Amino acid sequence: MELFESPSALQNYLKKERSSGKKIGLIPTMGALHQGHISLIEASVLENDVTVSSIFVNPLQFNNKKDLELYPRSLEKDLIMLEKAGCNAVFSPSAEQMYPQQPSLKIHFGYLEEVMEGKFRPGHFNGVAIIVSKLFHFVLPDKAYFGQKDLQQFAIIRQLVQDLSFPVTLVCCPILREKDGLAMSSRNVRIPDKNRPVAAKIYEALQLGQNTLLAQGIQECKRTVTEFISSHPELQLEYFEIVDSETLEAVPDVKQSRSLALCIAVYLNEIRLIDNLLVKILN
Ligand code: AMP
């Protein structure tokens, strides 16, 4: 496995690979890797000749300075996991290499950035769109892999690719969970052991929400999930939304939408955790 810190060294390597007709898969990450990330690498290894993963904690997408400072970093361990999974190249630039100058560009996504993550993390998706665009330019991947865990991010990147005609196929991979249902996340290492059981209540809330939605509809689902979360004093609900899984528009009624997503953001102490569950409505 090759490790690159400068965009030009990565580009030279990939130029050679591409000229011999090899297909390239890209998995952007912020490191502190877990099995969820590795499932994206494995999907790429199956479908491409060269798998490239980036590891870069992107300051531009953090609207909370403390969250950026506390974001876990474990490059050495990450490299071992990537090599084992069959990754061919890792791009791990410094902030100066990635941003020789502070970008002045602002990318807006209209409605897609006004709800949920966009509403509570102003500027976040601008930062995501800029880093993903840069990575697409450096790597020129045939396919790029993202997780359903960040469902809204996927919708934003799909829009970015459409609007700017990036010649890349996007792949959305399912959420990997711990045994108790907690969605794997780099931030989970910050959860104190004593709070670990209550963290699993987030997925329980989504499952309860799904059952209530199918039996009793939208309003009852919202009420039940909100009450369930507030019955655990360690958890503070930031949002719970029932949306169309592609447009992210709030759905007025279960019958109208074929693929819904239940999306939740919760604070456990100061740690912000997000999760979602897709619900297919068969009419
Ligand atoms: P991050 O390092 O958090 O930016 O995540 C890098 C990629 O891994 C994103 O596309 C995430 O959606 C994806 N990802 C994060 N957690 C999971 C998970 N539990 N299962 C599958 N993919 C995930």
Image (tube, rainbow, N blue to C red):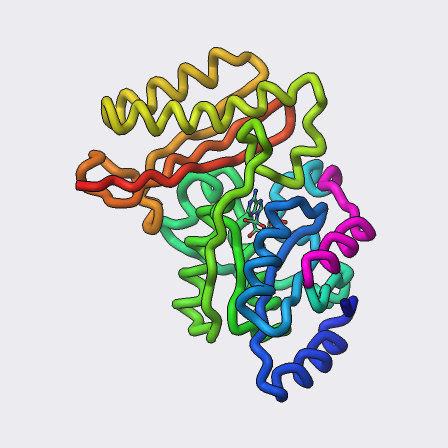
* Residue 4, visible in the rendered structure: no
The answer to which image quadrant residue 8 occupies is bottom right
Left or right: residue 283 compared with residue 29: left
Dominant SS in magenta? helix
Left or right: residue 28 compared with residue 227: right
The answer to which image quadrant residue 101 occupies is bottom right
Furthest residue to the bottom? 19
Query: What residue is at 48 percent from the left and 71 percent from the top?
Result: 168
Image quarter where the C terminus lies is top left
When the figure is inspected, residue 245 is found, relative to residue 277, above or below; the finding is below
Residue 134 picture location, percent across and down: 60, 68
When the figure is inspected, residue 184 is found, relative to residue 89, above or below; the finding is above
When the figure is inspected, residue 117 is found, relative to residue 156, above or below; the finding is above
Judging depth in this view, the residue of 28 and 181 nearest the camera is: 181
When the figure is inspected, residue 133 is found, relative to residue 12, above or below; the finding is above
Residue 213 picture location, percent across and down: 28, 27
Query: What residue is at 79 percent from the left and 49 percent from the top?
Result: 77
Judging depth in this view, the residue of 244 and 2 nearest the camera is: 2
Inspect the magenta stretch and tell me whether residue 144 lies in it.
Answer: no
Furthest residue to the right? 76
The part of the chain drawn in magenta is: 69-86
Query: What residue is at 41 percent from the left and 44 percent from the top?
Result: 114
* Residue 87, visible in the rendered structure: yes
Left or right: residue 103 compared with residue 7: left
Judging depth in this view, the residue of 21 and 15 nearest the camera is: 21
Inspect the magenta stretch and tell me whether residue 80 lies in it.
Answer: yes
